């Protein structure tokens, strides 16, 4: 069938909306009509080739839509089901079987390879040129796409698909890092570096978990003020104040938990130094491959801190996405306040607004 899709063709270049041919779904796949897809920082850095995903390729990995066709080997889905789509994983390796599919041994190839395991792509041009697909197991910047059924999560029929796509990556990353990895107890202290969508989602999750001291660190005054409106108890402008000193003062010696959503080496160092004795910090911000960050092993050795590298919130999407939806419905996780919708033909404006920080979480609607 024919479908319109936004195609990444070169670094630092706007996506091109093209009409492509979509092949038949494989036996283990679903064909999904995408209703909306979030725009994530990872889409931008892959467009710009921080990670060497072959181009041309259809990006997009925060899709939500309606099942149009069910592969012959798929069970548990029917035409008309509403789904939110998460990353792809094998389901058979030790990490998948132990409940950590975001660390699947095949995670990189399945999500950044730009093709299926048999080297085929779902998209092609009229003259037969292959166009990369299956980005994060979905390539959701398309009106229709074929995707592995195991990555799809059924949601209720009254679920607002135009809002839920980011639960499959950006919102899941921030909230999952807090709820699944850091696991702050009620009454605890949390500091979060970065007030983008991932950082704000982490903040909302910390609040839902009962943390009573939540410090947000950034350099943009407007976003820090917005963080306060959403529930931060303290904010620190790290352009004006040493964030390590500020956090230690606010928390009387250091935060019990910390999250770095920036992937910026000096910020990572600040996060490690902001932790209390035996505190736990997590890094979720993506950096270029090969990026190294300073880590004061001499001073920090006696602190007993733990630092975790976290992918996709270490979530099991079929368990965690419904949990986030339940928290949202209870009014305890208002991630909708982070979003702004754009038409499909405004996709490059959405990317630009995200890069400029004027929109925390753009959502493209079809």
Image (cartoon, helix red, strand yellow):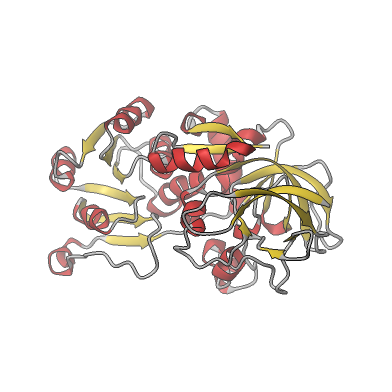
- Tell me where residue 270 appears, x and y as whole percent: 21, 53
Which residue extends farthest right?
72
Q: Is residue 73 left or right of residue 318?
A: right
Task: Identify the residue shown where x is 60% and y is 68%.
Answer: 113
Residue 319 drawn at (x, y percent): 60, 49
**Which quarter of the picture shows residue 232?**
top left
**Residue 24 visible in the current orientation:** yes
Q: Which residue occupies the foreground of this view, 56 or 338? A: 56
Tell me what residue is drawn at x 73 percent, y 57 percent: 149
Looking at the image, is 165 positioned above or below residue 97? above
Q: Nearer the viewer, residue 359 or 108?
A: 359
Q: Which residue is situated farthest in the front direction here?
A: 127
Residue 333 seen from this side:
no
Quadrant in the picture for the C terminus? top right
Percent position (x, y) of residue 133? Answer: 67, 60
Which quadrant of the structure image shows residue 292?
bottom left
Identify the residue at horizontal 63%, vertical 46% (top origin): 63
| Residue 296 percent coordinates (x, y) | 17, 65
| Vertical arrangement, residue 72 with respect to residue 141, above or below | below
- The extreme top residue here reads 229
Give the tally of numbered discs.
Answer: 0
Q: Is residue 44 above or below residue 354?
A: below
């Amino acid at each position: 069938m024919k479908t319109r899709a936004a195609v990444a063709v070169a670094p630092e270049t706007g996506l091109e909306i093209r009409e492509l041919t979509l092949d038949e779904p494989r036996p283990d796949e679903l064909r999904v009509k995408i209703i909306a897809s979030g725009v994530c920082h990872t889409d931008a850095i892959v467009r710009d080739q921080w990670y060497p995903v072959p181009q041309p390729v259809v990006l997009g990995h925060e899709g939500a839509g309606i099942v149009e066709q069910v592969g012959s080997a798929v069970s548990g889905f029917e035409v008309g089901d509403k789904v939110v789509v998460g990353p792809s994983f094998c389901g058979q390796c030790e990490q998948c079987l132990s409940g950590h599919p975001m660390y699947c041994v095949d995670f990189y190839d399945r999500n950044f390879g730009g093709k299926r395991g048999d080297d085929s792509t779902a998209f092609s041009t009229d003259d037969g040129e292959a166009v990369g697909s299956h980005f994060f197991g979905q390539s959701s910047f398309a009106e229709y796409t074929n995707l592995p059924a195991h990555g799809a999560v059924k949601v209720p029929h009254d679920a607002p698909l135009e809002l839920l796509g980011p639960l499959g990556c950006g919102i899941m990353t921030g909230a999952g890092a807090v709820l699944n990895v850091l696991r702050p107890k009620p009454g605890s202290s949390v500091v979060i570096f970065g007030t983008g969508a991932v950082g704000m989602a982490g903040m909302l999750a910390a609040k839902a978990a009962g943390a009573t001291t939540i410090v947000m660190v950034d350099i943009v005054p407007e976003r820090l003020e917005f963080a306060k409106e959403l529930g931060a108890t303290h904010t620190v402008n790290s352009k004006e104040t040493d964030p390590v000193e500020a956090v230690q003062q606010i928390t009387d010696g250091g935060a019990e938990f910390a999250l770095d959503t920036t992937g910026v080496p000096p910020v990572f160092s600040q996060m490690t130094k902001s932790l209390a004795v035996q505190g736990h910090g997590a890094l979720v911000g993506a950096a270029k491959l090969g990026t190294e960050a300073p880590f004061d092993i001499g001073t920090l050795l006696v602190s007993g801190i733990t630092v975790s590298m976290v992918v996709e919130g270490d979530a099991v999407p079929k368990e965690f996405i419904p949990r986030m939806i339940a928290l949202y419905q209870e009014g305890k996780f208002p991630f909708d306040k982070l979003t702004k919708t754009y038409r499909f033909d405004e996709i490059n404006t959405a990317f630009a607004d995200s890069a400029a920080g004027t929109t925390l979480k753009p959502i493209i609607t079809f």
